[in-house]
């Protein structure tokens, strides 16, 4: 459940996929960090391991995840920055499949149906709050709450024209895909 939001944001922030092979990823890190020694220190492994990976050698699942995360955080920083600024200025679109919980002034409900919402445009304020939360290491639950509040405002309350006291929460996020104009 918690990875759906991260995967959706990562897809929106990249224009090209990261290198597919271990060797490609390792060599990218070696270039970015200026040497196998620096990559080894960053990942907490031996220099020899990094040299082996750069040649396509074997790797544990745990270390493969470390390499992938290190590549993702360094991949296309100018593109990622431009997309983030555009989202914060103009908002972004989100497609969501989730199970929602609702509360209002009366009794609340956790409707167990999964819903696929039509594409919704969320404001730049929602984007700004979401990126700030991610930057400070907010929990997945806090990030999901920001998206749920944005969907409440844009979809469920129709911009404040109905159900003004409605509270919306995700009780099960299946998929979240983001895009920016």
Image (cartoon, helix red, strand yellow):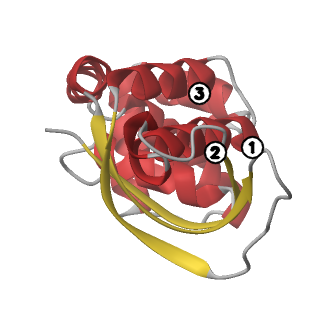
Disc sitting over residue 134 in the figure: 3
Q: Residue furthest bottom?
A: 113
**Residue at the image position 41 percent from the left and 28 percent from the top:** 127
Comes first in the chain, label 2 or label 3 = 3
Mark 1 touches mark 3? (CB < 8 Å) = no
The x and y percentages for residue 74 are: 40, 29
CA gap between label 2 and label 3 equals 11 Å
Nearest to viewer (mark 1 / mark 3): 1
Vertical relation: 44 (above or below) 170: above
Q: Which residue is mark 2?
A: 144
- Tag 3 secondary structure: helix
- Where residue 159 sits, quadrant-wise, is top left
CA gap between label 1 and label 3 equals 11 Å
Q: Nearer the viewer, residue 148 or 133?
A: 148
Q: Nearer the viewer, residue 58 or 120?
A: 120
Comes first in the chain, label 1 or label 3 = 3
Q: Which residue is mark 1?
A: 141
- The crowding category of the residue bearing disc 2, from other C-alpha atoms within 10 Å (few below 14, some 14 to 19, many at least 20), is many
């Amino acid at each position: 459940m918690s990875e759906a939001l991260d995967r959706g944001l990562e897809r929106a922030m990249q224009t090209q996929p990261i290198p597919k092979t271990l060797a490609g990823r390792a060599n990218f890190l070696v270039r970015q960090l200026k040497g196998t020694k620096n990559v080894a220190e960053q990942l907490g492994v031996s220099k020899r391991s990094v040299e082996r990976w750069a040649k396509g050698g074997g790797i544990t699942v745990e270390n493969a995840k470390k390499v992938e995360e290190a590549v993702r955080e360094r991949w296309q920083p100018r593109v990622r920055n431009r997309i983030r600024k555009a989202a914060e200025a103009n908002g972004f679109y989100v497609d969501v499949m989730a199970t929602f919980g609702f509360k209002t002034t009366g009794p609340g409900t956790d409707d167990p149906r999964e819903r696929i919402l039509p594409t919704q445009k969320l404001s730049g304020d929602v984007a700004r709050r979401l990126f700030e939360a991610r930057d400070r290491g907010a929990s997945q639950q806090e990030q999901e709450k920001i998206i749920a509040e944005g969907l409440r405002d844009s979809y469920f309350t129709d911009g404040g024209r109905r159900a003004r006291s409605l509270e919306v929460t995700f009780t099960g996020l299946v998929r979240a895909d983001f895009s920016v104009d």
